[in-house]
Amino acid sequence: ANHTNVVINGNYMNGFRTDLDSNDTLADIDILIGSTDDEGK
């Protein structure tokens, strides 16, 4: 999941990447952070 928010919250997201393998879960986290890049997928 390549999103602008990943750059803004890079350290925050990297903490989850080590524990979560599901792209869907990462997408859900992005939505919680406020990313709208996943809409339509």
Image (spheres, rainbow, N blue to C red):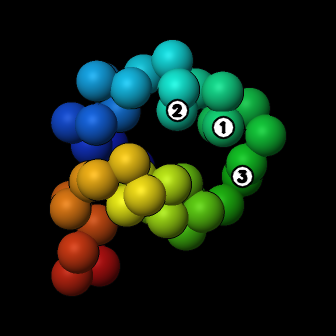
Q: Quadrant of residue 25?
A: bottom right
Pointer 1: residues within 10 angstroms few (<14), some, or many (20+)? few
Residue in the picture at 21% in, 59% down = 37
Q: Are marks 2 and 1 in contact (CB under 8 Å)?
A: yes
Binning the other alpha carbons within 10 Å of mark 2 as few (below 14), some (14 to 19) or many (20 upward) gives: some
Q: Judging from the image, what secondary structure is the residue with disc 3 in?
A: loop
Horizontally, residue 12 falls left or right of residue 36, namely right
Residue 6 location, x and y as percent?
A: 35, 33
Provide the residue designation for mark 3: 21
Between the residue at mark 2 and the residue at mark 1, the CA separation in whole angstroms equals 5 Å
The residue positioned 79% from the left and 40% from the top of the image is 19
Determine the residue positioned at 52% across, 32% down. 13
> What's the amino acid at mark 1?
Phe
Instruction: Name above or below for residue 10 compared with residue 17.
Output: above
Q: Which residue position holds label 2?
A: 13
Q: Determine the CA span between mark 3 and mark 1.
A: 9 Å
Q: Amino acid at mark 3?
A: Asp
- Relative depth, front residue between 33 and 14: 33
